[in-house]
């Protein structure tokens, strides 16, 4: 299956992915509604995008008491709006922090790979987000470890 | 002859077991379901009460879906007696069901506080669908509702009662609200928030009796003025449905929590009898102790593990993480794991002006419990909720981050990312294989 591969060393923090994502997911250009999140590192001098890995367990999907989270044609776990009641159980079941809740619709939502044409990857000007036929992975762990080492060392000193 | 599986209880654990058996065996076994009620999700009843969903939305299986999965049903019947040695269950109408292996998933029931008058009219629990219907009929715009008990169950229906236009007062015997879900500091944040949103709260109030007064309920307390109510909702705890097992030889624990003693495959003392959900004394993921976790996610995981094992797989269960989340008047409150552990290193942070609270509990470098509270529209709260679960669930080593988190309990994200928690979690699955979409299997092959 094709997944979103994240290459944080290429991310410039331009947030185009958040704009594109929020528009695709909610119809509004509103980064606070994006399900891909750009995290700052080293006092806002480097950045890493972060989103759902489409994990094998699908914690959100198995936790949903009404079966509102399903696997779509792109292989992504996706919330069926008409079925979701907004109980937020998926938000505590997902151990990655990539389940979201829209207060305006009172529904959960998440990365559904835009049904096979992810807007974030298309919007990224530096190929920090690509849509590829690879195994999903911890794309930002090494980067985050590297970019936080200095801050932690300074705090310890 | 095909293996005969018997599922006793049509709640979350039972239905997940059935689905998993069919995922594994494609229909080659016999499944019989005994359920006192038509299967529905208790989790979503508050949304039915709040009118955001229709009653039809609460059902987790229909006669058609059960037929498609080739499940024989005894709906409306209760288990009366288990003869574990001869593998026969007797139902309350005398019908006997033979099985090769069986799952006990009979769940819990609500328990009213036993005060005089508690069984009078207009006094309800909110646990079953029938109870939900009774509350819906009684709670009308302008009606005065008194909720006895300020625990998790009470809080799940708080929004719905307010959305029906009722005036709500919550009374709690403990000195504070949510005594088994959050600590005192967090309870204080929630309490102030609720008072700002027009919910009456009375803590440390011991209910002594409920009397009838001109068509209304009059609640009397040990101290303080009585309260008048049109509708009283008793959210005063639950009891596991295990009495019917007496004499079966199935070992149950006799401490306060009770529950069927199970091994790591969720088998009881009789190896052909499994237990799951509220009645099972399963493993606590964090401590390794045997405990009853009467929460939806545990019932779901137990049910899936039992289903896989019944279908012939060999699935050991890692254990369940105690966790709860509730939103009241757009304030999110969640806790994970051992949040009330006096032996842990505890770091807390309170931003009282923003109604935000965090609590992190460590044993060495390991996060063993966490608490989070904040306005639901704060998107960073939502992200952190999941990451806290991931940190507690994975048991990742946070030693390098402990000092930072002590100073900055709100700064979870970099710690989650830099400790490669995602990488630790990705290979982990409950059943040792990827999960299936819930609509599968829609049909199974006929024998």
Image: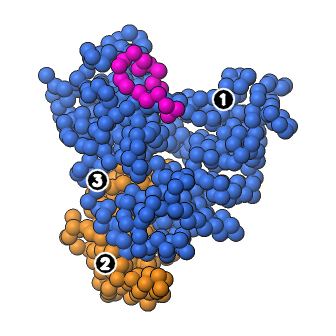
Chain colours: A orange, B blue
Q: Is residue B253 visible?
A: yes
Outermost residue, left side:
B1
Residue at mark 1: B113
Q: Residue A45 or B341: which is nearer the viewer?
A: B341
Q: Nearer the viewer, mark 2 or mark 3?
A: 2
A21 up-or-down from B302: above or below? below
Left or right of B194 on screen, residue B386: left
Residue at mark 3: B429
Q: Residue B267 or A27: which is nearer the viewer?
A: B267
Discs 1 and 2 share one subunit: no
Discs 2 and 3 share one subunit: no
Mark 1 Cα-neighbour bin, 10 Å: few <14, some 14–19, many ≥20: some
| Residue A139 spot, x, y in % from top left | 30, 74
Q: Quadrant of residue A38?
A: bottom left
Left or right of B403 on screen, residue B250: left
Stretch in magenta: B241-257
Mark 3 Cα-neighbour bin, 10 Å: few <14, some 14–19, many ≥20: some
Left or right of B378 on screen, residue B15: left
Indicate the secondary structure of the residue bearing disc 1: loop
Mark 2 Cα-neighbour bin, 10 Å: few <14, some 14–19, many ≥20: some
Q: Residue A138 or B69: which is nearer the viewer?
A: A138
Residue at mark 2: A142
Marks 1,2: beta carbons within 8 A? no
Q: Is residue B170 visible?
A: no
Report, in whole angstroms, how far the alpha carbon at label 1 lies from the one at label 2.
Answer: 54 Å
Chain ID, mark 2? A
Left or right of B93 on screen, residue B117: right
| Residue B142 spot, x, y in % from top left | 77, 42
């Amino acid at each position: 299956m094709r997944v979103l591969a994240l290459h944080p060393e290429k991310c410039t923090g331009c947030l185009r992915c958040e704009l594109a994502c929020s528009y695709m997911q909610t119809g509004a250009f509103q980064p606070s509604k994006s399900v891909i999140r750009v995290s700052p590192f080293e006092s806002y001098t480097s950045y890493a995008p972060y989103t759902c890995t489409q994990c094998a367990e699908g914690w959100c999907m198995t936790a949903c008491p009404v079966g509102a989270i399903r696997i779509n044609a792109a292989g992504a776990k996706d919330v069926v709006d008409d079925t979701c009641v907004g109980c937020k159980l998926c938000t505590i079941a997902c151990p990655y922090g990539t389940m979201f809740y829209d207060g305006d619709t009172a529904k959960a939502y998440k990365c559904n790979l835009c049904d096979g044409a992810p807007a974030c990857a298309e919007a990224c000007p530096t190929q920090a987000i690509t849509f590829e036929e690879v195994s999903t992975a911890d794309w930002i762990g090494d980067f985050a470890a590297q970019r936080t080492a200095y801050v932690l060392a300074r705090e310890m000193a | 002859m095909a293996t005969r599986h018997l599922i006793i209880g049509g709640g979350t654990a039972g239905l997940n077991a059935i689905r998993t058996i069919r995922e594994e065996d494609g229909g080659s076994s016999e499944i019989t379901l005994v359920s006192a009620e038509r299967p529905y999700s208790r989790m979503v009843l508050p949304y039915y009460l709040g009118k955001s969903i229709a009653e039809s939305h609460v059902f987790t299986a229909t006669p058609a879906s059960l037929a498609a999965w080739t499940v024989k049903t005894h709906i409306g019947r209760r288990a009366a007696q288990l003869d574990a040695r001869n593998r026969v269950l007797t139902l309350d109408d005398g019908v006997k069901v033979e099985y090769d292996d069986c799952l006990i998933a009979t769940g819990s029931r609500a328990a009213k506080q036993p005060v005089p008058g508690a069984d009078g009219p207009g006094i309800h629990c909110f646990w079953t669908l029938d109870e939900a219907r009774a509350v819906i009929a009684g709670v009308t715009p302008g009606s005065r509702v008194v909720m006895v008990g300020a625990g998790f169950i009470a809080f799940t229906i708080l929004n719905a009662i307010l959305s029906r236009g009722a005036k709500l007062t919550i009374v709690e015997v403990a000195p504070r609200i949510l005594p088994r879900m959050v600590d005192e500091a967090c309870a204080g944040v929630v309490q102030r928030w609720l008072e700002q949103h027009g919910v009456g709260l009375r803590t440390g109030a011991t209910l002594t009796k409920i009397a009838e007064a001109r068509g209304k309920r009059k609640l009397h307390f040990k101290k303080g003025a009585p309260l008048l109510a049109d509708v009283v909702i008793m959210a005063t705890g639950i009891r596991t449905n295990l009495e019917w097992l007496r004499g079966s030889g199935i070992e149950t624990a006799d401490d306060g929590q009770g529950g069927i003693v199970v091994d790591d495959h969720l088998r009881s003392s009789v190896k052909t009898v499994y237990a799951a959900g509220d009645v099972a004394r399963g493993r606590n993921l964090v401590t390794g102790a045997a405990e009853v976790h009467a929460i939806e996610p545990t019932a779901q995981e137990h049910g899936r593990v039992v289903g896989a094992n019944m279908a012939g797989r060999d699935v050991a269960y890692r254990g369940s993480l105690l966790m709860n989340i509730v939103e009241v008047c757009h304030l999110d409150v969640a806790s994970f794991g051992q949040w009330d552990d006096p032996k842990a290193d505890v770091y807390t942070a309170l931003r009282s002006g923003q109604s935000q609270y965090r609590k992190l509990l460590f044993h060495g470098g390991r996060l063993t419990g966490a608490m989070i509270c904040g306005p639901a529209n704060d998107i960073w709260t939502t992200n952190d909720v999941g990451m806290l679960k991931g940190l507690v669930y994975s048991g990742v080593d946070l030693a390098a981050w402990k000092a930072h988190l002590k100073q900055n309990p709100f700064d979870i994200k970099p710690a989650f990312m830099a400790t490669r928690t995602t990488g630790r979690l990705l290979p982990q699955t409950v059943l040792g294989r990827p999960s299936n979409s819930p609509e599968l299997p829609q049909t199974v092959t006929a024998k």
